[in-house]
Structures are given as structure tokens and as C-alpha cells.
Amino acid sequence: MIEPVEIHTRLSSLDALESEAIHIIREVVAEFEKPALLFSGGKDSVVMLHLATKAFWPGKVPFPVLHVDTGHNFPEVIAFRDRTVERLGLKLVVGSVQDFIDSGELAERADGTRNPLQTVPLLDAIQQNKFDAVFGGGRRDEDKARAKERILSLRDEFGQ
């Protein structure tokens, strides 16, 4: 007689986090009409896009990616962003800080940094495209404000 084999299936901590993230992505897509994923081509957004790809594999990611372009990007990162979007067959929406500076709606900062200027183009892109949910990849260890974020952050029309 063959003895039954006891199989233990335990996810590692990282596998459990990945599984939870994939579940959340699928739930958001099920509950919202027009989600989008912030994708700059940076490490955090690459991880988010990878999770979205896994969530819908072997199908296609069913929402566009949104990049708020500061204009201060390495050309290689923009090329990677574009290749990745093309390879996955995704729609890319770009909100440009420079466009808002050129139109006079934003002013260049004295210190030259544009990261604080991203909010206006982000909210504009969300409104123009009627996105009702946006995935971001901010890590809790990066900023005190992000450390307090929940998994889902509900915002008003002003992004607050």
C-alpha cells in the first residue's frame, strides 16, 4: 500500500504580498469602469505593470497606462517605457508638465525640480480620460505621507 503524501502549500511572505496585489488589481478592474496604471518606466511602476500583467495573463492588461512626464527623464527610460507599452499592446496616455508650463498654467520652479508640478497634469489627464481609478506604485518607506496611505485611497475631484 502506498502511503499518502502530505503536501504543504505555504506561500512565502513575498508570494503572499504578490497574490494580494494581484487580487486587488483584479477587484479594481471588476468594480471600476475606467482604471489606469501610472507608468513612468521607473522601478516602482515596472513592478506594478508586471503585477497587472500577471493578474490578467494570458490575456492583455485591460486598462491604459498613464505617464506624467516631467520632461526631466533619461532618454533610455522613455525608450524603455515606449518599448514596454508597445510589446504589451497597451494604450499610453501622457500628461506633460512642459505643456502646462508652456500654456502658463504652471510656472517653472526656482530650484528647477518638476516633481511637485506633476499634480496638475495628473489630475487633468484623469479628468480628460475619465479615469475612475488609478493604480500607483508609491512605497510606504519613501515618504511619511505615503506611510499613512491605505491600499485604496479615495480622492475628490481636486485629488485630495
Image (spheres, rainbow, N blue to C red):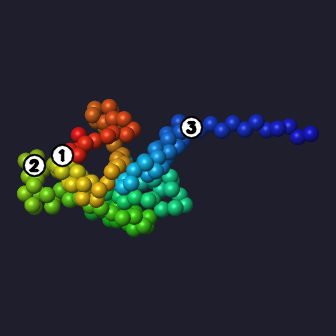
Q: Residue at x 37, y 60 (%)?
A: 64
Q: Residue at x 59, y 38 (%)?
A: 11
- The amino acid type of the residue labelled 2 equals Arg
- Picture disc at residue 82: none
Is the C-beta separation of discs 1 and 2 under 8 Å?
yes
Near mark 2 (Cα within 10 A), the count class, few <14, some 14-19 or many ≥20, is few
Q: Is residue 67 visible?
A: no
Camera-nearest residue between 76 and 78: 78
Provide the secondary structure element on which disc 3 rests: loop
- The amino acid type of the residue labelled 1 equals Pro
Question: How far across and down, in percent of the image, does residue 71 sit?
Answer: 20, 58
Separation of marks 3 and 1 at Cα, in angstroms: 37 Å
Left of 17 or right of it: where is 143?
A: left
Separation of marks 1 and 2 at Cα, in angstroms: 9 Å
Q: Earlier in the sequence, mark 1 or mark 2?
A: 2
Question: How far across and down, in percent of the image, does residue 78 sit?
Answer: 30, 62
Q: Earlier in the sequence, mark 3 or mark 1?
A: 3
Provide the secondary structure element on which disc 1 rests: helix
Near mark 1 (Cα within 10 A), the count class, few <14, some 14-19 or many ≥20, is few
- The amino acid type of the residue labelled 3 equals Ser
Is the C-beta separation of discs 3 and 1 under 8 Å?
no
Toward which corner of the image does residue 145 lie, by quadrant? top left
Q: Which residue is mark 1?
A: 116
Q: Which residue is mark 3?
A: 12
Q: Which residue is mark 2?
A: 109
Question: How far across and down, in percent of the image, does residue 21 sit?
Answer: 47, 44
Question: How far across and down, in percent of the image, does residue 6 sit?
Answer: 76, 36
